[in-house]
Image (cartoon, helix red, strand yellow):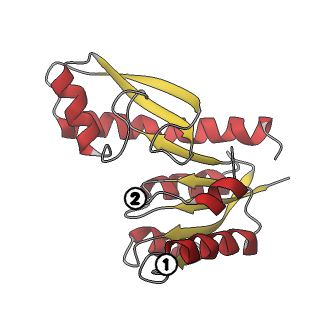
Amino acid sequence: MRRQLAIFASHEGTNLQTVIDACKADLLQADVAVVISNNSGAKALLRASEHGIAKHHLSSTTHPDPDELDKAILRTLDLHAVDYIVTAGYMRKLKTRVLAAYAHRIFNTHPSLLPKYGGRGMYGSRVHEAVLAAGDKVTGITIHEVNEHYDEGDIIAQTRVPVMPNDTPMTLAARVQALERRFLIETLATILETRRY
């Protein structure tokens, strides 16, 4: 049975594209049912349109009351019969109703070996800058469940990426991102094969 995925993205949607491609290639026994963004100008929404995938802009602009926004997101997930959520560069914290309804079914990628360099404000180049400033020899990627705290959900899988002596935040980010896409698909495939929610 093919599972229905919701992808939450705030900007470019590169990991969204990776998941779409993997679904089309049957690397994942799933389909992207809906894309949700808090940013009406996100390229992720354009990617969804290009692939005939339902898309929704849901944010404090569309729903100024946080509780109403939480309800609207949950209604949208129900409408599309979503089984699992992947947050792929989504820059907003999910709220109580969605977290409760999809407990242990929301997954995020983070560009470090959590619990190192996680938490509020730690994303993108900030993570790689922190790794280099600390002089770490190894960094990596973590795929974890999402809960009410930034980057504190149960860790599902991690993979390591060496830090090179001449790395800059940009070169380190490029190496991490190149591996992140493959690792995300491999981990999602395992989740879909082994979990029955």
Residue at image coords 53%, 48%: 148
Does 9 appear above or below 148? Answer: below
Q: Are marks 1 and 2 in contact (CB under 8 Å)?
A: no
- Inspect this view and state whether residue 117 appears: yes
* Image coords of residue 51 (percent x, y): 57, 72
Query: What is the distance, in whole Å, between disc 1 and disc 2 at their CAs?
Result: 18 Å
Q: Which residue is mark 2?
A: 91
Q: Given the image, on which type of amino acid does mark 2 rest?
A: Met
Mark linked to residue 65: 1
First of labels 1, 2 by sequence position: 1
Q: Where is residue 110, by image quadrant?
A: top left
58 left or right of 169 in image: right
* Image coords of residue 13 (percent x, y): 44, 60
- Inspect this view and state whether residue 84 appears: no
Residue at image coords 61%, 76%: 72
For the image, the number of numbered tags is: 2
Depth order, front residue of 26/19:
19
Q: Residues within 10 Å of mark 2 (few under 14, many from 20)?
A: some
Q: Residues within 10 Å of mark 1 (few under 14, many from 20)?
A: few
- Look at the numbered disc 1 and give the secondary structure of its residue: loop
Q: Given the image, on which type of amino acid does mark 1 rest?
A: Asp
Depth order, front residue of 94/88:
94
* Image coords of residue 71 (percent x, y): 63, 73
